[in-house]
Amino acid sequence: MASRIRVVEPGLVYSATQRCNDRRFLFRPDHNPANPLLHIDCPSEALDSASPVIPVPSTINVIGASAARSLALHPLNLHWLEGNVNHLHDGFSTTPEQIGNVAPFFRDFLSNVARGINRILERTNHVFGGRYHMEPCLDLPSAEQQLVYALTNAVKDGLVERVSESPFFSTYRHLAFGEPLAFWRIDWDAYWRAGGPRKKSHKPKDYLRWDTLELTPLPGWENLTISQRQTRVRRLVRDVEEEVADRRRAEGCIAVGVPRLYALSPFERPKRPPDDDPQPLCHASDAESRREFKRQWREIMAEYRKASIDYRAGYHEREFPEGTYRPPIVTIYTSSRL
């Protein structure tokens, strides 16, 4: 049994992180900066019906289209999604009816990202080094703190001076200015159902589809107007940018900068990878809330251990604590034939 089980409680915001395999730089920027809204990294003639060219997605388009498609199939409340050179940050919450969608959403999202990245880089390997990590935010201040942490991650890591300069996947401009999050994909299922390459009258680009990634305001922001939410995001981000800029000036440091980020090889490894910080149990704005959550967590873990023992012993109707996920049933077939 995993040391950290997943527990999802409706209404709570969860901060999640997915890291690349071996800390490789797989999410390097490769999109077309001249056309950031459409996120198309291909010649304009690729969309011409007479052109045989198949559009080539960028890593930004792969991440955005994968998230939009997975969200349509497995709805939940996605609050933010941010990229860095070797990891992704996202925040989500659920309604009681959406609890069962969390695992399928991340399964499809990460699987589609991995396959898309491997196609772009012409490689075959794991993209993500392990399962995603998630921690609950117990109140609005901690949820806001995690939102700002994700948005300003590239700034605090010394990659860019301002969030608006980040060349990686980011929902900042949508949250701060209302810019749409539109991404394209090839509907390969429809292409193959129509005959695939055997039918010469159509091409993969004929099955290009546009998806819009829909974000949901943080719980507690629903009563704010769109303008008020955008202003709050810009102010929170600006405060962090100014704090980091002051620290850099005091230390005599500068950011890496966009040109050097574009020069990164997707297979390059950091010379001195930073040590992983211990995964927190939760995020809260006061110590009392953290202590109470820790007490409840121990109770859930104790009940989950009992349920898991019974379940693995063959009692498959055993009830698990609400919001947790039971292990999958694996049927093993044996044969007497050698």
Image (cartoon, rainbow, N blue to C red):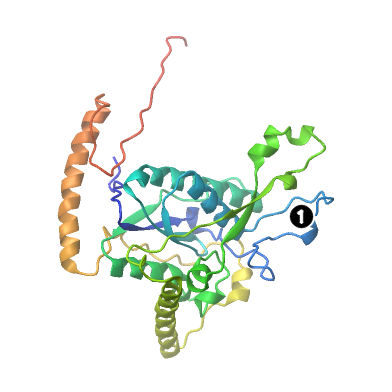
Report whether residue 267 is seen. Answer: no
**Quadrant in the picture for the N terminus:** top left
- Few, some or many C-alpha atoms within 10 Å of disc 1 (few <14, some 14-19, many ≥20)? some
The residue that appears at 22% across and 32% down in the rendered structure is: 309
Image quadrant assignment for residue 225: bottom left
Where is mark 1, residue-wise? 47
Badge 1 marks a residue whose secondary structure is helix
Image quadrant assignment for residue 318: top left
Where residue 65 sits: x, y (%)? 58, 53
Where residue 19 sits: x, y (%)? 45, 56
Residue, far right: 50
Count of numbered tags:
1
The residue that appears at 26% across and 24% down in the rendered structure is: 314
Report whether residue 184 is seen. Answer: yes
Front residue of 267/74: it is: 74
Above or below for 44 versus 99: below
Where residue 279 sits: x, y (%)? 31, 59
The residue that appears at 37% across and 62% down in the rendered structure is: 276
Where residue 96 sits: x, y (%)? 31, 46
In the rendered structure, the answer to whether residue 65 lies left or right of residue 320 reads right
Residue, far top: 337
Front residue of 124/27: it is: 27
Above or below for 41 versus 305: below
Front residue of 139/109: it is: 139
Q: Amino acid at mark 1?
A: Leu
In the rendered structure, the answer to whether residue 145 lies left or right of residue 179 reads left
